[in-house]
Every structure is written in C-alpha cells, then in structure tokens.
Image (cartoon, helix red, strand yellow):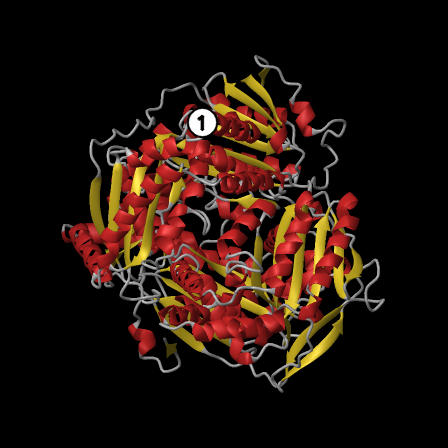
C-alpha cells in the first residue's frame, strides 16, 4: 500500500487496557518494570543496549539498542499492553518515478526463501489472529508492521516478515503480476491487443485520478526539487513501465539490508525473545555495509517560486465554476530537531485549526473557497518539514486575492500573536491525547516516530511529550513573542516558498489516456513476432500460476483450537437519569469519561431525513447559548476531548425489515471537566444557534467538498451502499445518510443561493431528535468517578427536560415496535430488559436494481449485494465464514491477481452478503467473477484447512481488542448481549463444509435471493447499451 506519510502527533492515543495474559508471560512484574532492569552496555543476543528511559507520560519504558554486526538500530517500547507490535522500516530513497520502492514492497510479500509459496502475506491473513498486518511505502521509507494479541502468532508472523523483507524470492513472475507487464488484453487470445497490466500500475492510475492526490504529490515534488522528494516513490503510472526486474532486484540489494534498517517492537512480550528470534533468523547472516540512502538537506532558494498544474474536472464539485486550488508552501527546519518540530506542529494548529484561527477566519469565512487546500498545515514526513496554507474550490479570478490574504494574515499574526486561551486549549488537547487509551497504540507509535528516526533523529526524545510541553511553556514565559518570532522566521522572511495553483482541464483524462496509448505504442512498435509470442507465452504462464492450487503448508499457522472458546464478558449496570435509561460501564479509562446518547429518529417527518447528516455535522459548530461558534469551539477544545453527532442506522439483529434509526451523540473529557462538558450539551439542546446563515454556508461548502473528495478513496463503500439500497429498509436509509444520494444532495445544497430552507429545517429536526423522551445514554468511566458522573448526568437531564415532546411516527407503512432486548445484567427499566424502539417497514419489497455512476476516474469500484439473513439467524455465522473464505481462496486470485484490481472480496453484515472490488480496471467482467465465486462455493471446491483459515480470519476481527472507552457499546447500540455474542461465537466454531455449501446454494445461487449491483467508474459503452442498467 502506498501512502504519503503525514505529521501524526495528533495520532497519539494512549494506554490500551491490559488484555488477557497468556500463560507463559512473566507475571511477577510489569513489562515496564522488567525493561528498566536493562543497563546501557549490556549485550543481549548480538545487540548492545544503548539507552534505557522511563517514559511515564506514555506508561512505557523505552530501550534503545544497536546490532553489533550490522549496525541495525532497534527500539523496544515495553508497555503493559497485550496487543504486541513489530515493525521493520528501511530507508528507501528512489531517484526516479518508476515506483521501485512501492513495487518492491508488493513483490517481497509474494514468497521468500523459507516460505516460497506464492503470496504468503495474504495467506497469513487467514492463518493468524493478527490485529493488524500491512506494509507502507512513504516518500523515503518502507515499513512492514504487524500486531497480535497471541504470543505464538507473534512468533509465526515475525518469521514470515523477517524472511519476506530480507530473503524474498523476487521472482520475475511476481514482479510482472504486482508491478507491470505487457500482456494481451485476453491472455488466452494472442490476437487481442497488447495492454499494460499490473496491480501497482492500476493502483497508481486510481490514486492519481484523485485531484487531491495529484496536487499533494506535485507540491512535494516542486518544493523539494533536488533529491528523492522530487520523484513519485509510489510510481507515476506512465513511468512504471520503465522499471525492469533487474533494477528491482538491485534496489532490494542496496536498500533492504539490516545496516539500513530500524526495528521496533512494542507491548508486554519479553524483549530478549524478540532479539534472539531476529538475530537467529535474519541478522546473523549479514555483515555491516554503508548504504548510500542518506537524504541531503534541500538547498534553500534565494527567492520564492510559483508553478501551475492541471487536474481532471470534478462533476460533484460544490460549485462547478470554482474548481481551482492555490496554496503557499514553506520549507521549514530539520525534523530531527525534536523541540523545534514540536513547536512548529503546535504553531500550525494555532494558525489554521478551528474557527478562531487566523487562517480560518481570513480564508474560509469570506467564502472564496470551499475548504482549505488538500495539503494544509505542518507536514513532518520529509527530512525538512513544510507548512502549507491555501484554498480549494476557488474561482480563477480569486487566486491573486487568496495569495494577498495569506500574506496579510501572516503579517497580522506577527503583530498581534495568539490568545492565551487558544494556546491552553491546544495543550489541553495534548493532555487528552495522552490520557485516551487506544487499542492500536503500538501502531500509532511506530508511525509517529518513523520519519524522524528514518533520518537518524532520536525516537526516544519524541516520546517525552510532557518534557516538550514544559519546555514550550517555559519558552512562552521567557519570550512572549516566541511564537510570533517563529512565524516571522519561517513564513514572513522565508525565501523558500512555493505558490502552486491547480486548475481543471476538461481534456485531462483524455490526455492521460492518449499519453498511455503513446507509451504503449512506443513499447510495442519495436516488438518482433518472437517478442510478441514470448509475451503471449508469459501471459499464459502467469495465468496458469495464478490458477494453480497453492501449497501453503510451508507457512506457520495457528489452529482453531488456539482460539479462546469463551469470549470475555463486560459487566454493565442500568439506571435512569431524569427518566432516561442509562448504561453505566466501569472501566480503567485513565481519568477520562466517555458519554454517548442515542436519540431516535422515529418521529422525524420523511422530508427531513435527507437533512439529518447535515444537521449532525453542524449542530456542534454553529454556537449555542451565550457562545458564538468561535467561543463554542474554544470551550470544546478547553473542556472536552471532542463533541460529535452522527447519524446511525442499526439493522435489527433478528428481523431483516426492522431497524433502529437515530443520531449518536458522543463526547469525552477529563474527569475534572465533566460539569463543563454537560453544560455545553445543555446549551446545544436548549439554545442552538440556527440563525447563523453565513456560518452555515461555510460549513455546507466544506462538507460538500469533503464528500466529493472522498469518493475516489472509498468508492467501493459507495458502490456497496448503492447496491444494498433496494434490498433492505435499513440499507436504503444508510444510502440516504452516507451514499451517493447524500453526496448529490449536499452538492445541491451547496449550490443554493438562499439557505433559508435549510435554516428552517434545522430547528424542526432538533425538536424531534434532541428529545429526552426518545433517548438512552451510556457512560464509561472509572469506578470511583461513576457516582459523580451519574449525578452530573441527572443534572443535565433536568436542564434539558424542557425539550420533552410527544410525537407520532409519520408514515402509515412504518410500525414502531417496542422490542425488549435480553436483559442487561444489573436490572433495567422493565426489570427484564431494555426497550428499543425499532421500526418495521410493513410491505417492504426488495427488488433487483443495477446502477452505474459515471465518474471522472479511470478505474472502477464494483459491488453486488445479496439479501440474506440478520445476525441472530442460524445461517449468519456460516455466511460470515463463507465471505472470508471466498475472499481468500477465490476472489483475491480472480480480482486482484488475474484482474489487476488493487483489491476485492466479499463481506457479510447488516443482512447483506456483499461482493466488492477496489480500483478495478474491469467492470461487468468483475460481476462475472463474483458469479463464478458463488459457483465455486456451491461446488464445495475447498478443504477443511480452507474453512479453518477462514475461521481464524473471522475470529481475528471478532476478538479485536476493544478500548475501555468502547466497552459495552455492542450491547448499548445493538442490544447484542454477552450471551448473544457467545451464541454467535459458538455458531462460528460449529460451521462445517456442509453448512457452507448449503448457504452458498440457498443464498448465492442465481434466482435464489434478491440481489442488486452498482458500479462507479469511467464512461462505459457496454453498460450504456444494456437497458437493465440505470446510468446516472
């Protein structure tokens, strides 16, 4: 997976709750305490300890080591967290845009010395209980991380990852499959035209169909024009076919060496075992080298520069006449200066985060653009950081105005500085981030330190966040103009500034297609008949290899018997506050409180439904009570960890045509700020400011732009949502709230010259939603603070009691069913369970529908969904296992390996069995692959091993770690009790070959159940001519 690394200080989430301990783990002391016993200079399995540092802010002990023989660097973060993580990262610094580090990342995972089977990486996804497995290519490093809660699994995955990275097969056939190849369009027809194929080739075509991605890549290339950042490490699609297999192998030999590697481990497993494993299986076979991968500083310019690029037009842009982007980007200091990087990151937030920030006021509120530019703020992913500020969705005639505003705003900041309260709000945010407990803290930590460590910065210094905050406060105290001086130095007086504009070109896609045809012509015109025959033969060889059953017996694997038979339970207590049902869940939340409220939509008139996502997004951003929207945002940052409102559709766990609809209120805060947090909610309930038309217009434009930008990243989810729309009432409403219908609705709203209809709708919606009669609440907090929290919640309910109203459901075809779900444990309002007001759409008729959306990108997102059964049905577990098995054993090979799509598979949920593909060069052919997959399943062409692997994969998701803030949420939101979860678990264990063939035949056979399809993609003549498709 290629990704542009980001500045991710904001990703820090701390203190995962300790998971279940495996028997062999040392229990006498904590992992942190054991690690403190190491001494600098101590030798352990070929490594020498360099530094041992306690980091109390993050509840960990950091141990830095160096490998004696190769010089490989190693950091271990010992923490009492059972979700252990390993990663190895290599500094990969390409000098061209052929995508060599990206294609290498894919190819090393296609088989190695000890594990020579094809695609061991994807096979291990089904032989493991991993909580994360992936690989990333950034601009200047490649990282291979995994995490798991199972110690045996950790050893298995470590062996596979070490062998893949350091001893890959790097077969030419794998390079051709993953990177690029010339091949007949139909590999079995030598007369069919030659075309470019390859997974990375198609992935990057899809990536660069997104104008945001085009802009970000061009900005980096032009700001850093003199070394590795001037090229596309992921691969420029038309440069990828210039890469040879021999060049790939040479790049591996020079860059994938322990002397160029940084190892990171995290969690509660013993460090010695990791070191011994890595030494024996990899590092002992290498000697030290001096890799030439250093990234020199970018020579600074003596004067600013300007440049211009083009992109494809966006048919879903909020305003089609305003599709220009302009941004000023400044070269900053070296990211290895930890305190300077920390300061500049905070300064970036002060400059442009939130409605009180100078650039928000100056650029967004005049409504000359729809949102900040796609690249904005501090970016520490390159050796020297950068700061960027600009707008997207602007008119061409406003570009000069944007530049002037940026310059003027910088001057004003230098003159006036920042309010002390805004600085305090930002430091409070850091405190919250350190308190919050995340289940993927190890992965966030690995990503957080990666860029700085990659350039030989000290990763341990990055972890001392409390010390950085204290030093920052001292600097502010000693020099009140500390931040203004930084703005003066890095922005006002900085000659290394790039101003980059981007405008749409109607012929952009056509020019890209022409350039690809010309590239293809240059590649093919010199081919002899012998060359063409060789291409045809290699195509058949690859197809045969892809079709051949794979022997994966060389790979390590967990067994189904390694999975815990009984899942842990989460005790909760039920109570009431002001007559509203409340679920209390005592958890080790590290001084944080988490509040949720589910507010029913059952009484909301139908004409208002489509407005609900907009209502949710603006409710906490318009101001409330005596606070205008700036003051409200400031108080939220000072007193909470965030306040959000989101639409929610919950399919009933027992009936396909029943569902619950509502909005979910969520907020968190430090225990000392609970009264302030509930005070803010009270003001939102009692006196939201729905008369702020100018503020609303800014929010509408930002929301519409964000939705339009998101389609090229998540097109498969939009395709699945559309396919499911005609199959169940819940899926229909989900598409209204979060599918293409919502994207188009928001585009229409953004184009409205008069927003008064929206302003009139918002208070009408509020009367139905923010109504204590239609609410239930949940609180997760530490045991000793729960009583106080209950008291504060009771006060909140009294404060908002004036919003109580009685309404009736609005459609005669909808019946409200008072469902008493199984008991909570600890009592409930009814004495036996909790009342959920679910809706049943009487007479709903599922229907077959095929929808095609013509989009401005060169790849497709394809989905087909089948109406099946709800969660509590006896067949649900079998369908879950079937979806996972079909993905791994059939669809992956057909859609990705043979078809060249970046991804594809099947998933089960919400009563729908859904097929999908992602960044796919094919459209209707992929629908045929889905059908063949169903035929394969019905034929029973799979083994018991295949079934067991599918079970492991499903259980890795079922047993994924849950943060203390989220414990009990399945029960609160879905009414799924611990007992129901255990019953589902037992059904998963019991799934047999007969069950899988049976459900495949009954649900996936043609004509057996109602199905629907959707495709998002480029112009498609075949579909246009087919009257069974609705083309939008």
Relative height, residue 566 to residue 85 (above, below): below
Q: Position of residue 391 (x, y in %)?
A: 33, 53
* Quadrant assignment for the C terminus: bottom left
Residue at position x 47%, y 68% in the image: 739
> Number of marks in the image?
1
Residue at position x 41%, y 61% in the image: 698
Asked whether residue 627 appears in the rendered view, the answer is yes
Indicate the secondary structure of the residue bearing disc 1: loop
Q: Position of residue 407 (x, y in %)?
A: 28, 43
Residue at position x 66%, y 57% in the image: 596
Describe residue 213's horizontal placement relative to residue 127 as left or right.
left
Q: Position of residue 872 (x, y in %)?
A: 70, 67
Describe residue 1019's horizontal placement relative to residue 56 as left or right.
left
Q: Residue furthest left?
A: 526
Please state which of residues 116 and 304 is positioned toward the viewer in this rendering: 304
Q: Position of residue 302 (x, y in %)?
A: 20, 31
Please state which of residues 890 and 854 is positioned toward the viewer in this rendering: 854
For disc 1, the marked residue is 479
Relative height, residue 801 to residue 37 (above, below): below
Residue at position x 30%, y 44% in the image: 408
Q: Looking at the rendering, which quadrant does residue 23 occupy? A: top right
Q: Looking at the rendering, which quadrant does residue 505 occupy? A: bottom left
Relative height, residue 735 to residue 61 (above, below): below
Q: Say few, some or many: other residues with alpha carbon within 10 Å of mark 1 (under 14 / 14 to 19 / 20 or more).
A: few
Relative height, residue 761 to residue 210 (above, below): below
Please state which of residues 41 and 809 is positioned toward the viewer in this rendering: 809
Asked whether residue 867 appears in the rendered view, the answer is no
Q: Residue furthest top?
A: 41
């Amino acid at each position: 997976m290629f990704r542009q690394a980001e500045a991710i200080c904001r990703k820090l989430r701390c203190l995962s709750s300790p998971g279940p301990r495996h028997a062999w783990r040392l229990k006498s002391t904590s992992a942190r305490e054991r690690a403190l016993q190491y001494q600098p200079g101590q030798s352990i399995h070929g490594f020498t300890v360099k530094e041992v540092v306690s980091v109390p802010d993050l509840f960990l002990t950091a141990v830095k080591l160096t490998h004696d023989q190769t010089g490989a660097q190693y950091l271990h973060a010992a923490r009492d967290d059972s979700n252990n993580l390993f990663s190895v990262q290599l500094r990969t610094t390409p000098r061209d845009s052929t995508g060599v580090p990206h294609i290498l990342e894919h190819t090393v995972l296609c088989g190695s010395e000890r594990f020579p089977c094809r695609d061991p990486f994807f096979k291990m996804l089904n032989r493991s209980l991993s909580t994360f497995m992936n690989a990333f290519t950034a601009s200047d490093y490649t990282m291979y991380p995994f995490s798991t809660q199972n110690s045996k699994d950790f050893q298995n995955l470590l062996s596979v990852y070490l062998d893949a990275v350091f001893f890959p097969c790097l077969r030419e056939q794998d390079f051709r499959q993953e990177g690029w190849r010339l091949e007949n369009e139909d590999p079995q027809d030598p007369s069919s035209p030659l075309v470019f194929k390859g997974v990375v080739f198609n992935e990057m075509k899809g990536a660069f169909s997104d104008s945001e991605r085009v802009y970000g890549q061009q900005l980096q290339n032009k700001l850093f024009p003199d070394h590795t950042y001037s090229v596309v490490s992921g691969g420029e699609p038309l440069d990828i076919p210039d890469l040879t297999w021999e060049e790939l192998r040479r790049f591996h030999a020079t860059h994938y060496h322990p002397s160029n590697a940084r190892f990171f481990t995290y969690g509660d497993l013993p460090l010695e075992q990791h070191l011994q494993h890595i030494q024996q299986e990899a590092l002992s076979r290498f000697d030290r080298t001096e890799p030439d991968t250093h990234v020199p500083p970018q020579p600074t310019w003596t004067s600013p520069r300007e440049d211009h690029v083009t992109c494809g037009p966006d048919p879903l842009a909020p305003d089609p006449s305003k599709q220009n982007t302009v941004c000023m980007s400044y070269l900053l200091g070296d990211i290895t200066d930890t305190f300077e990087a920390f300061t500049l990151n905070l300064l970036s937030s002060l400059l442009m985060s939130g409605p009180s920030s100078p650039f928000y006021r100056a650029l967004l509120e005049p409504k000359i653009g729809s949102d900040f530019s796609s690249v904005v703020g501090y970016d520490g992913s390159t050796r020297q950081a950068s700061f960027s500020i600009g707008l997207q969705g602007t008119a061409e005639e406003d570009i000069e105005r944007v530049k002037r505003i940026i310059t003027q705003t910088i001057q004003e900041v230098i003159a006036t500085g920042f309010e002390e309260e805004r600085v305090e709000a930002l430091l409070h945010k850091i405190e919250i981030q350190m308190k919050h407990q995340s289940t993927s803290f190890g992965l966030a930590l690995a990503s957080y330190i990666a860029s700085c460590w990659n350039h030989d910065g000290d990763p341990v210094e990055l972890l001392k966040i409390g010390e950085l905050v204290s030093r920052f406060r001292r600097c502010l105290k000693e020099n009140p103009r500390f931040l203004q001086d930084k703005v003066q130095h890095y922005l006002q007086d900085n000659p290394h500034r790039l101003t980059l504009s981007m405008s749409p070109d109607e012929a952009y896609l056509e020019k890209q297609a022409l350039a690809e045809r010309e590239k293809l012509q240059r590649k093919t015109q010199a081919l002899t008949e012998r060359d063409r025959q060789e291409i045809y033969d290699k195509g058949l060889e690859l197809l045969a290899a892809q079709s051949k059953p794979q022997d994966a017996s060389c790979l390590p694997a967990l067994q189904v018997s390694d999975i815990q038979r009984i899942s842990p339970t989460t005790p909760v207590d039920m109570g009431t506050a002001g007559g509203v049902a409340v679920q209390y869940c005592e958890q080790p939340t590290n001084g944080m409180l988490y509040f949720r409220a589910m507010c029913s939509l059952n009484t909301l008139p139908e004409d208002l439904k489509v407005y609900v996502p907009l209502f949710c997004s603006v409710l906490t951003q318009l101001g409330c009570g005596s606070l205008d929207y700036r003051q409200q945002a400031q108080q939220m940052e000072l007193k909470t960890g965030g306040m959000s409102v989101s639409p929610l559709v919950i399919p009933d766990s027992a009936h396909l045509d029943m569902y619950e609809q509502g909005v979910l209120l969520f907020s968190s805060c430090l225990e000392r700020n609970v009264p302030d947090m509930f005070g803010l909610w009270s003001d939102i309930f009692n006196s939201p400011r729905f008369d702020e038309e100018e503020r609303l217009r800014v929010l509408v434009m930002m929301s519409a732009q964000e939705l339009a930008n998101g389609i090229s990243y998540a097109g498969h989810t939009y395709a699945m949502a559309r396919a499911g729309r005609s199959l169940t009432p819940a899926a229909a409403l989900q598409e209204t709230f979060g599918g293409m219908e919502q994207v188009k609705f928001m585009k229409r709203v953004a184009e409205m010259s008069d927003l008064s209809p929206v302003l009139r709708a918002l208070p009408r919606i509020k009367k139905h939603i923010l109504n204590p009669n239609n609410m239930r609440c949940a609180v997760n907090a530490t045991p000793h603070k729960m009583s106080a929290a209950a008291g504060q919640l009771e006060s909140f309910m009294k404060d908002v009691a004036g919003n109580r109203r009685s309404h009736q459901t609005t459609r005669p075809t909808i019946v409200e069913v008072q469902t008493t779900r199984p008991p909570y444990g600890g009592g409930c309002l009814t004495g036996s369970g909790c009342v959920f007001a679910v809706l049943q759409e009487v007479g709903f008729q599922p229907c077959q529908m095929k929808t095609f959306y013509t989009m401005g990108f060169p790849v497709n997102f394809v989905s087909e969904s089948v109406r099946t059964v709800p969660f509590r049905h006896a067949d649900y577990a079998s369908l879950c296992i079937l979806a996972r098995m079909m993905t791994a054993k059939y669809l992956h090979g057909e859609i990705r390996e043979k078809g060249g799509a970046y991804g594809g598979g099947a998933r089960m949920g919400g009563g729908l069995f859904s097929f999908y593909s992602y960044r796919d060069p094919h459209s209707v052919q992929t629908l045929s692959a889905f059908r063949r997959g169903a035929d394969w399943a019905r034929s029973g062409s799979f083994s018991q091993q295949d079934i067991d692997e599918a079970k492991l994969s499903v259980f890795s998701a079922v047993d994924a770690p849950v943060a203390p803030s989220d414990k009990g949420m399945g029960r609160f939101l879905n009414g799924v009790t611990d007992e129901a979860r255990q019953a589902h678990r037992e059904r998963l264990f019991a799934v047999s070959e007969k069950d899988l063939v049976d459900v495949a035949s009954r649900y996936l056979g043609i004509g057996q159940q109602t199905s629907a399809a959707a495709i998002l993609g480029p112009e498609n003549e075949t579909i246009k001519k087919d009257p069974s498709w609705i083309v939008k």
